[in-house]
Amino acid sequence: MDEKQAKNLVEALIFSAEEPLSIESIRKILSSYGKFNLEKLIDGLENDYKSRGINLHSIEKKNYYFRTSEDLGVFLNIQTKKTRNLSQAAMETLAIISYHQPVTRAEIEKIRGKPVFRGTLDNLLSLKWIKPAGRRETPGRPVTWVTDLEFLKHFGLSSIKDLPKVDELESIIM
């Protein structure tokens, strides 16, 4: 397999994956066909798709997926798009998790000043916007929560570091 075929294989793997494909998975498959500079191949694909109708995106340079180009989004608005409104409690909980992760339910309740009901976390889990990230080494060993890849993907973020800073948000609100 030559470098062009390797690049085509990487493109096909990412394109056909149901979820963002990890660089480890790509590397494992590609290694069966020879030694290639995977980062160079991916950079080439990102460059190839930069000005096209779909773009190659990454989440923290670890997980890759194709997505419709942002400038075409207005033309592809589907009228039957099913929207699901989050409750105020769910939005507050998601904001706390995204800015304070990893965070326990008790910590979320302390920040919100209100209880967090199981349904709130269940809704965020079903959207795959949050996930459990282990347990704290404290009495009761509470579950800690973090944002999931779907959260980053839905909001078009490459990394959780791309969230606006709290002082930026305050300046918008004021």
Image: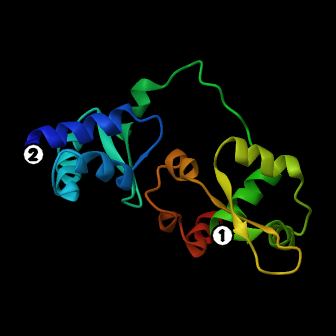
**Crowd class of label 2 (few under 14; some 14 to 19; many from 20; radius 10 Å):** some
Query: Is residue 131 placed above or below 85 in the rendered structure?
Result: below
Task: Give the residue at mark 2.
Answer: 3
* Residue type indicated by callout 2: Glu
Residue 7 x, y percent position in the rendering: 17, 42
Considering depth in this image, is 109 or 131 the residue closer to the camera?
Answer: 131
Does residue 8 appear to the left or right of 159 in the view shown?
A: left
Residue 26 x, y percent position in the rendering: 32, 48
* Residue type indicated by callout 1: Gln
Considering every residue shown, the one lying at the far top of the view is: 80
Quadrant where the N terminus sits is top left
Quadrant where the C terminus sits is bottom right
Q: Secondary structure at mark 1?
A: loop
Residue 125 is tagged as none
Residue 101 is tagged as 1
Considering depth in this image, is 119 or 15 the residue closer to the camera?
Answer: 15
